[in-house]
Amino acid sequence: MSFPENFTPELVVESPGRINLIGEHTDYNLGYVLPTAIEKKITFKFKRNHTEKECNLYSLGYNTGFTLQLDKIARSNVEWENYILGVLNEILLRTDKLRGFDCTIESKLPMGSGLSSSAALECGLAFGLNELFDLGLSKMDIVQLSQKAEHTFVGTQCGIMDQFASVMSEKGHVILLDCKSLEHQQIPIHIAPYKMIMLNTKVSHNLASSEYNTRKRECEEGVAIIKKKYPEVMSLRDVTATMIQEFEETMDATLFKRCSFIVSENDRVLKTANALKANDLKLFGSLLYEAHEGISKLYEVSCPESDFLVDFSKQYNAVLGARQTGGGFGGCTLNIVHKDKVNAFVEEATKAYKEAFNIELEAFEVQPSAGTYIQN
Ligand code: GLA
């Protein structure tokens, strides 16, 4: 399929990726997370095509597109199409106002790098269609239907963090989100003279076919065991550090590691939020290192490449902390680096990484940015 050359959009929407400062795999355990959108994003151009049901979508990055009929939505064998189909399916379950449209998609977000290009894709599409057809969906509806689309059409039983961050973020802030109540606080972030530097391992892991769903199941099994003694426990969010310790001898070792990580990670998110409010950057950095240790040794969602980069950063006084961010098994590490030493650090990390893995490291700075918006 080639896209009509005379395509003049009625609406342009920008949908950002996200980083998560801390609080990994806590969202589906109804705990806390601390993400923000970043300025790397996906651009959608939309136009109504005045048909009842025909939709044409074109990815400028993949240089390919597809046509679908709104009354014949079904899962596709092509992975990226399922993000689109899933969102359309969820919208159709909520409203009958959707009609035919044409859309081009252009991504500046590296796929599979732990920056949640999937949420950006889902939320940008839902946000744009809501505007184009006046569907009356709230921002929260867009977040929730996008998450649901990922469960049903993509097959990842993801939490709500990525979609929430992609839509709700505010420039210069991180979101302290309680994934149980969905209450959230926008926390201003001032880390000068430090910068947030991402190192992309270029190791990408497909969450849908990965261990992600297994981790979720392991946590549920842990909760079922804890519940026998503490019936009030509904999720790992309700478990304290003292409570989990009681299960060290009796719980299966793997389940115990998974559950202990989540309990301590929730605590680290709250400590990090306080450290940022108090401008205690040293504490912020050490919590990142602590979190990575848990990600690697207890939750076991890291990989040799991410571990290498985090360890490497520990030699530098100019780096306050680092950890792998996102779902895991690769993607990017987040590094808090003094502005005067960014170039030297990136240069040396690139050299060492190339020697160790023969992979060309990619480095870029990120800044807390606004969630999905209409471009004027
Ligand atoms: C992926 C999921 C999120 C979250 C993270 C891990 O990005 O989509 O819901 O679970 O992994 O923190």
Image (tube, helix red, strand yellow):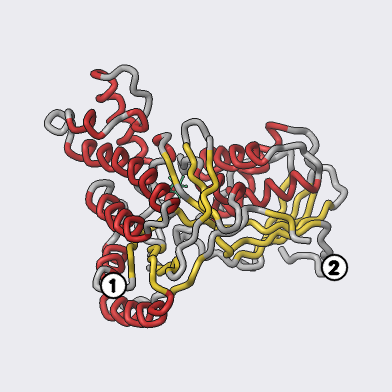
In the image, which is nearer the foreground, mark 2 or mark 1? 1
- Which residue in the structure is indicated by mark 1? 317
Residue name at image x 81 percent, y 41 percent: 134
Quadrant in which the C terminus is drawn:
bottom right
Going from the N terminus, do you reach mark 2 or mark 1 first?
A: 2
Q: Which quadrant would residue 315 be assigned to in this image? A: bottom left
Q: Is residue 152 above or below residue 371?
A: above
Q: Residue furthest left?
A: 249
Label 2, label 1: how many angstroms apart (C-alpha)?
55 Å
Q: Amino acid at mark 2?
A: Asn
Q: Is residue 348 above or below residue 233?
A: below
| Location of residue 120 in the rendering, given as x and y in whole percent from the top left corner | 59, 54
Q: Is residue 283 left or right of residue 123?
A: left
| Depth order, front residue of 241/56 | 241
State whether label 2 is within 8 Å of ligand 1.
Answer: no
- Which residue in the structure is indicated by mark 2? 6
Quadrant in which the N terminus is drawn:
bottom right
| Depth order, front residue of 90/245 | 245
The crowd level at tag 1 (other Cα within 10 Å; few <14, some 14-19, many 20+) is: few
Q: Residue furthest right?
A: 50
Q: Quick one: SS at disc 2? A: loop
Q: Is residue 192 above or below residue 229?
A: below
Q: Amino acid at mark 1?
A: Asn
| Location of residue 135 in the rendering, given as x and y in whole percent from the top left corner | 77, 38
Residue name at image x 42 percent, y 57 percent: 279
| Depth order, front residue of 366/76 | 366
| Location of residue 5 in the rendering, given as x and y in whole percent from the top left corner | 81, 69
Res 271 seen here: yes
